[in-house]
Image (cartoon, rainbow, N blue to C red):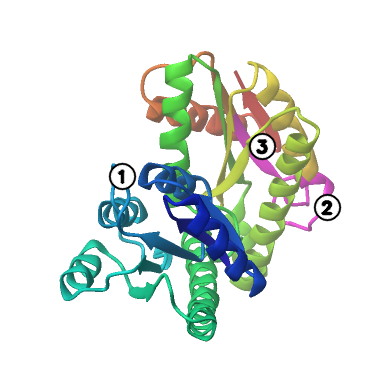
Protein backbone atom coordinates (compact mmCIF):
# COMPACT_ATOMS: atom_id res chain seq x y z
CA UNK A 1 0.00 0.00 0.00
CA UNK A 2 0.95 3.65 -0.36
CA UNK A 3 0.56 5.16 3.12
CA UNK A 4 0.57 8.78 4.25
CA UNK A 5 1.92 9.03 7.80
CA UNK A 6 0.93 12.28 9.51
CA UNK A 7 3.14 12.70 12.57
CA UNK A 8 4.77 15.82 14.02
CA UNK A 9 7.51 13.87 15.83
CA UNK A 10 10.31 13.01 13.43
CA UNK A 11 11.65 10.32 15.77
CA UNK A 12 8.25 8.60 16.01
CA UNK A 13 7.77 8.95 12.26
CA UNK A 14 11.14 7.29 11.55
CA UNK A 15 10.30 4.30 13.78
CA UNK A 16 6.78 3.92 12.38
CA UNK A 17 8.01 4.25 8.80
CA UNK A 18 10.62 1.54 9.36
CA UNK A 19 7.97 -0.80 10.80
CA UNK A 20 5.57 -0.22 7.90
CA UNK A 21 8.26 -0.55 5.25
CA UNK A 22 9.31 -3.86 6.78
CA UNK A 23 5.80 -5.11 5.89
CA UNK A 24 6.36 -4.04 2.27
CA UNK A 25 4.44 -0.77 2.28
CA UNK A 26 5.49 2.59 0.77
CA UNK A 27 5.36 5.48 3.22
CA UNK A 28 5.31 9.25 2.80
CA UNK A 29 5.68 11.44 5.88
CA UNK A 30 3.82 14.68 6.54
CA UNK A 31 5.03 16.60 9.59
CA UNK A 32 1.87 18.70 10.05
CA UNK A 33 -1.79 18.86 9.16
CA UNK A 34 -1.18 21.40 6.41
CA UNK A 35 1.62 19.26 4.98
CA UNK A 36 -0.79 16.31 4.98
CA UNK A 37 -3.32 18.30 2.95
CA UNK A 38 -0.60 19.29 0.48
CA UNK A 39 0.49 15.65 0.08
CA UNK A 40 -3.11 14.46 -0.27
CA UNK A 41 -3.86 16.85 -3.12
CA UNK A 42 -0.82 15.67 -5.09
CA UNK A 43 -0.84 11.91 -4.52
CA UNK A 44 -3.38 9.08 -4.25
CA UNK A 45 -2.92 7.14 -1.01
CA UNK A 46 -4.37 3.78 0.02
CA UNK A 47 -4.30 4.66 3.74
CA UNK A 48 -3.65 7.61 6.03
CA UNK A 49 -2.22 7.15 9.54
CA UNK A 50 -3.15 10.32 11.43
CA UNK A 51 -1.66 11.63 14.65
CA UNK A 52 -4.17 13.52 16.80
CA UNK A 53 -2.11 15.97 18.80
CA UNK A 54 -0.19 18.26 16.46
CA UNK A 55 0.64 21.97 16.68
CA UNK A 56 -1.55 24.22 14.56
CA UNK A 57 -4.05 21.96 12.80
CA UNK A 58 -4.73 18.81 14.84
CA UNK A 59 -5.59 15.40 13.42
CA UNK A 60 -9.35 15.86 13.74
CA UNK A 61 -9.38 19.11 11.76
CA UNK A 62 -6.99 17.69 9.16
CA UNK A 63 -9.26 14.66 8.67
CA UNK A 64 -12.33 16.87 8.29
CA UNK A 65 -10.57 18.88 5.58
CA UNK A 66 -9.40 15.74 3.76
CA UNK A 67 -12.96 14.40 3.68
CA UNK A 68 -14.12 17.73 2.25
CA UNK A 69 -11.50 17.44 -0.52
CA UNK A 70 -12.72 13.96 -1.43
CA UNK A 71 -16.26 15.19 -2.05
CA UNK A 72 -19.17 12.78 -2.29
CA UNK A 73 -17.68 10.12 -4.57
CA UNK A 74 -17.75 6.80 -2.73
CA UNK A 75 -14.81 5.44 -4.69
CA UNK A 76 -12.65 8.42 -3.65
CA UNK A 77 -12.88 7.55 0.06
CA UNK A 78 -9.48 6.94 1.71
CA UNK A 79 -9.32 5.01 5.01
CA UNK A 80 -7.94 7.07 7.90
CA UNK A 81 -6.64 5.44 11.09
CA UNK A 82 -5.85 7.64 14.07
CA UNK A 83 -2.60 6.80 15.80
CA UNK A 84 -2.70 7.88 19.43
CA UNK A 85 -1.49 7.11 22.93
CA UNK A 86 -4.88 8.02 24.48
CA UNK A 87 -7.89 6.32 22.88
CA UNK A 88 -10.40 7.84 25.30
CA UNK A 89 -14.15 7.59 24.56
CA UNK A 90 -14.19 11.31 23.76
CA UNK A 91 -11.35 10.93 21.25
CA UNK A 92 -13.06 7.95 19.62
CA UNK A 93 -16.33 9.84 19.15
CA UNK A 94 -14.57 12.97 17.87
CA UNK A 95 -12.48 10.90 15.45
CA UNK A 96 -15.49 9.13 13.95
CA UNK A 97 -17.39 12.39 13.58
CA UNK A 98 -14.37 13.96 11.86
CA UNK A 99 -14.34 11.16 9.29
CA UNK A 100 -11.86 8.70 10.80
CA UNK A 101 -12.30 4.95 10.49
CA UNK A 102 -10.23 3.31 13.22
CA UNK A 103 -7.79 3.75 16.10
CA UNK A 104 -4.44 2.19 16.83
CA UNK A 105 -2.03 2.79 19.68
CA UNK A 106 1.40 4.22 18.97
CA UNK A 107 2.74 1.40 21.10
CA UNK A 108 0.76 -1.36 19.35
CA UNK A 109 2.62 -4.68 19.16
CA UNK A 110 4.12 -5.70 15.82
CA UNK A 111 1.47 -8.39 15.29
CA UNK A 112 -1.41 -5.95 15.86
CA UNK A 113 0.05 -3.35 13.49
CA UNK A 114 0.65 -5.97 10.82
CA UNK A 115 -2.92 -7.32 11.19
CA UNK A 116 -4.33 -3.81 10.79
CA UNK A 117 -2.26 -3.30 7.65
CA UNK A 118 -3.48 -6.60 6.18
CA UNK A 119 -7.08 -5.51 6.72
CA UNK A 120 -6.39 -2.11 5.13
CA UNK A 121 -4.67 -3.81 2.18
CA UNK A 122 -7.84 -5.74 1.46
CA UNK A 123 -9.84 -2.51 1.59
CA UNK A 124 -7.30 -0.81 -0.71
CA UNK A 125 -7.69 -3.62 -3.26
CA UNK A 126 -11.49 -3.29 -3.17
CA UNK A 127 -11.21 0.48 -3.47
CA UNK A 128 -8.99 0.13 -6.54
CA UNK A 129 -11.48 -2.20 -8.22
CA UNK A 130 -14.33 0.15 -7.37
CA UNK A 131 -12.44 3.13 -8.83
CA UNK A 132 -11.73 1.16 -12.01
CA UNK A 133 -15.40 0.17 -12.33
CA UNK A 134 -16.48 3.77 -11.76
CA UNK A 135 -14.12 5.06 -14.46
CA UNK A 136 -15.37 2.39 -16.85
CA UNK A 137 -18.99 3.35 -16.19
CA UNK A 138 -18.17 7.02 -16.64
CA UNK A 139 -16.45 6.30 -19.94
CA UNK A 140 -19.42 4.25 -21.12
CA UNK A 141 -21.74 7.11 -20.21
CA UNK A 142 -19.69 9.42 -22.42
CA UNK A 143 -19.54 7.09 -25.42
CA UNK A 144 -21.97 6.50 -28.23
CA UNK A 145 -23.12 2.90 -28.05
CA UNK A 146 -22.91 2.26 -31.79
CA UNK A 147 -19.67 3.95 -32.82
CA UNK A 148 -17.66 4.24 -29.60
CA UNK A 149 -17.10 7.95 -30.25
CA UNK A 150 -17.93 10.66 -27.74
CA UNK A 151 -21.69 11.09 -27.58
CA UNK A 152 -23.52 14.41 -27.85
CA UNK A 153 -23.61 14.91 -24.08
CA UNK A 154 -19.88 14.35 -23.66
CA UNK A 155 -19.12 16.58 -26.64
CA UNK A 156 -21.23 19.41 -25.22
CA UNK A 157 -19.42 19.16 -21.87
CA UNK A 158 -16.01 19.23 -23.55
CA UNK A 159 -16.96 22.16 -25.76
CA UNK A 160 -18.27 24.23 -22.84
CA UNK A 161 -14.89 23.97 -21.17
CA UNK A 162 -12.76 24.37 -24.32
CA UNK A 163 -14.78 27.32 -25.61
CA UNK A 164 -14.39 29.17 -22.30
CA UNK A 165 -10.64 28.60 -22.44
CA UNK A 166 -10.51 29.88 -26.01
CA UNK A 167 -12.59 32.95 -25.13
CA UNK A 168 -10.45 33.87 -22.12
CA UNK A 169 -7.17 33.35 -23.96
CA UNK A 170 -8.43 34.83 -27.25
CA UNK A 171 -7.43 31.62 -29.05
CA UNK A 172 -8.85 30.18 -32.30
CA UNK A 173 -11.48 27.46 -32.22
CA UNK A 174 -12.52 25.32 -35.19
CA UNK A 175 -15.48 23.06 -35.81
CA UNK A 176 -16.29 20.60 -38.60
CA UNK A 177 -19.80 19.25 -39.13
CA UNK A 178 -20.09 16.04 -41.18
CA UNK A 179 -23.01 14.16 -42.72
CA UNK A 180 -22.99 10.82 -44.57
CA UNK A 181 -24.33 11.45 -48.07
CA UNK A 182 -27.69 9.89 -48.94
CA UNK A 183 -27.65 7.75 -45.83
CA UNK A 184 -31.42 7.19 -45.82
CA UNK A 185 -31.11 5.69 -49.29
CA UNK A 186 -28.26 3.50 -47.96
CA UNK A 187 -30.51 2.19 -45.16
CA UNK A 188 -33.42 1.65 -47.53
CA UNK A 189 -31.27 -0.27 -50.02
CA UNK A 190 -28.93 -2.27 -47.77
CA UNK A 191 -30.94 -2.50 -44.53
CA UNK A 192 -30.48 -0.99 -41.10
CA UNK A 193 -27.93 -3.54 -39.89
CA UNK A 194 -25.72 -2.67 -42.85
CA UNK A 195 -26.42 1.00 -42.07
CA UNK A 196 -25.05 0.49 -38.57
CA UNK A 197 -21.94 -1.15 -40.02
CA UNK A 198 -21.54 1.80 -42.37
CA UNK A 199 -21.73 4.33 -39.52
CA UNK A 200 -19.17 2.36 -37.50
CA UNK A 201 -16.81 2.28 -40.48
CA UNK A 202 -17.17 6.02 -41.08
CA UNK A 203 -16.73 6.78 -37.37
CA UNK A 204 -13.56 4.68 -37.24
CA UNK A 205 -12.22 6.43 -40.34
CA UNK A 206 -12.90 9.86 -38.84
CA UNK A 207 -11.30 8.91 -35.53
CA UNK A 208 -8.17 7.54 -37.22
CA UNK A 209 -7.79 10.59 -39.45
CA UNK A 210 -8.13 13.01 -36.54
CA UNK A 211 -5.82 10.91 -34.37
CA UNK A 212 -3.19 10.98 -37.11
CA UNK A 213 -3.50 14.77 -37.33
CA UNK A 214 -2.92 14.97 -33.59
CA UNK A 215 0.09 12.66 -33.82
CA UNK A 216 1.52 14.69 -36.70
CA UNK A 217 0.99 17.83 -34.56
CA UNK A 218 -1.10 19.42 -37.29
CA UNK A 219 -3.71 19.61 -34.56
CA UNK A 220 -3.61 18.93 -30.85
CA UNK A 221 -6.54 17.92 -28.70
CA UNK A 222 -8.93 17.54 -31.65
CA UNK A 223 -11.64 14.91 -31.19
CA UNK A 224 -14.61 13.38 -33.01
CA UNK A 225 -18.14 12.96 -31.66
CA UNK A 226 -21.34 11.48 -32.99
CA UNK A 227 -23.65 14.45 -33.23
CA UNK A 228 -26.75 12.41 -34.00
CA UNK A 229 -27.98 9.94 -36.60
CA UNK A 230 -25.53 10.03 -39.51
CA UNK A 231 -24.02 13.34 -38.40
CA UNK A 232 -20.62 13.74 -36.79
CA UNK A 233 -18.64 16.67 -35.43
CA UNK A 234 -14.91 17.29 -35.17
CA UNK A 235 -13.85 19.78 -32.51
CA UNK A 236 -10.45 21.42 -33.07
CA UNK A 237 -9.35 23.73 -30.24
CA UNK A 238 -6.43 26.15 -30.35
CA UNK A 239 -4.87 25.68 -33.80
CA UNK A 240 -4.00 28.41 -36.32
CA UNK A 241 -6.73 29.55 -38.66
CA UNK A 242 -6.67 27.46 -41.84
CA UNK A 243 -5.50 24.25 -40.16
CA UNK A 244 -9.09 23.01 -40.16
CA UNK A 245 -9.17 23.28 -43.95
CA UNK A 246 -6.45 20.68 -44.42
CA UNK A 247 -8.04 18.31 -41.91
CA UNK A 248 -11.45 18.73 -43.57
CA UNK A 249 -10.07 17.72 -46.96
CA UNK A 250 -8.21 14.76 -45.43
CA UNK A 251 -11.40 13.52 -43.78
CA UNK A 252 -13.48 13.71 -46.98
CA UNK A 253 -10.76 11.93 -48.95
CA UNK A 254 -10.25 9.25 -46.27
CA UNK A 255 -13.94 8.27 -46.21
CA UNK A 256 -14.09 8.05 -50.00
CA UNK A 257 -10.88 6.01 -50.03
CA UNK A 258 -12.59 3.24 -48.03
CA UNK A 259 -14.60 2.50 -51.22
CA UNK A 260 -17.61 1.26 -49.28
CA UNK A 261 -20.31 0.39 -51.86
CA UNK A 262 -23.32 2.73 -51.97
CA UNK A 263 -25.24 2.18 -55.20
CA UNK A 264 -27.79 4.88 -54.41
CA UNK A 265 -25.24 7.64 -53.81
CA UNK A 266 -25.64 9.50 -57.12
CA UNK A 267 -22.73 9.02 -59.50
CA UNK A 268 -20.22 8.08 -56.81
CA UNK A 269 -21.34 4.51 -56.12
CA UNK A 270 -19.49 4.55 -52.78
CA UNK A 271 -20.05 5.98 -49.31
CA UNK A 272 -19.06 9.65 -49.18
CA UNK A 273 -19.54 12.54 -46.78
CA UNK A 274 -20.27 16.23 -46.98
CA UNK A 275 -18.54 18.59 -44.58
CA UNK A 276 -18.94 22.15 -43.37
CA UNK A 277 -16.10 23.74 -41.42
CA UNK A 278 -15.51 27.06 -39.73
CA UNK A 279 -12.83 28.66 -37.58
CA UNK A 280 -13.42 31.46 -35.07
CA UNK A 281 -10.09 33.28 -34.75
CA UNK A 282 -10.21 34.38 -32.05
CA UNK A 283 -13.18 32.74 -30.34
CA UNK A 284 -15.87 35.25 -29.50
CA UNK A 285 -19.54 35.31 -28.65
CA UNK A 286 -21.50 32.08 -28.24
CA UNK A 287 -20.32 28.71 -29.50
CA UNK A 288 -23.83 28.02 -30.84
CA UNK A 289 -23.17 30.52 -33.61
CA UNK A 290 -20.21 28.41 -34.72
CA UNK A 291 -22.46 25.36 -35.02
CA UNK A 292 -24.95 27.35 -37.10
CA UNK A 293 -22.21 28.50 -39.47
CA UNK A 294 -20.74 25.01 -39.84
CA UNK A 295 -24.21 23.56 -40.44
CA UNK A 296 -24.93 26.15 -43.14
CA UNK A 297 -21.65 25.26 -44.87
CA UNK A 298 -22.46 21.56 -44.59
CA UNK A 299 -25.67 22.00 -46.55
CA UNK A 300 -23.85 24.20 -49.02
CA UNK A 301 -21.51 21.24 -49.65
CA UNK A 302 -24.49 19.00 -50.25
CA UNK A 303 -26.10 21.45 -52.64
CA UNK A 304 -22.81 21.70 -54.53
CA UNK A 305 -22.82 17.98 -55.26
CA UNK A 306 -21.73 16.18 -52.05
CA UNK A 307 -18.43 14.36 -51.39
CA UNK A 308 -16.76 17.67 -50.61
CA UNK A 309 -15.88 20.15 -47.88
CA UNK A 310 -17.00 23.75 -47.65
CA UNK A 311 -14.83 25.63 -45.16
CA UNK A 312 -14.19 29.23 -44.22
Please give the name of the residue rendered at 44% of the width and 52% of the height, measured from the top-left corner: 9
Please give the name of the residue rendered at 26% of the width and 55% of the height, measured from the top-left corner: 64
Of the residues under marks 3 and 2, which one precedes in the sequence?
2
Q: Which of 18 and 174 is in front in this view?
A: 18
Mark 2 = which residue? Answer: 259
Circle 2: element type? loop
Left or right, residue 157 beside residue 58:
right
Q: Which of the two marks, 3 or 1, is nearer to us in this view?
A: 1
Q: Circles 3 and 1: CB distance less than 8 Å? A: no
> Dot 3 surroundings within 10 Å: few (below 14), some, or many (20 or more)?
many
User: Is 263 within the magenta?
Assistant: yes
Question: From mark 3 to mark 1, how far is it between C-alphas?
Answer: 73 Å
Vertical comparison of 281 with 181: above or below:
above
Of the residues under marks 3 and 1, which one precedes in the sequence?
1
> Dot 2 surroundings within 10 Å: few (below 14), some, or many (20 or more)?
few
Residue 306, which numbered label?
3
Mark 1 = which residue? Answer: 55
Which residues, given as a range, are shown in magenta? 255-276
Amino acid sequence: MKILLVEDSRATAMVTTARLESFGHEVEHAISGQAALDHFQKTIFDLILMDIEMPGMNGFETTTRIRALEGNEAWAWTPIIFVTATDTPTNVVTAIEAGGDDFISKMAPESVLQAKMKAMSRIAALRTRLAHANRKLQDQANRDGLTGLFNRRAMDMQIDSLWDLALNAKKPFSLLMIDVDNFKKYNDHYGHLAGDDCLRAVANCLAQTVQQANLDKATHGAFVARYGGEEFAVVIPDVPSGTHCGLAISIVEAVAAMRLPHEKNAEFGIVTISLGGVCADPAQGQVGRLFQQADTLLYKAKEAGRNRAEVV
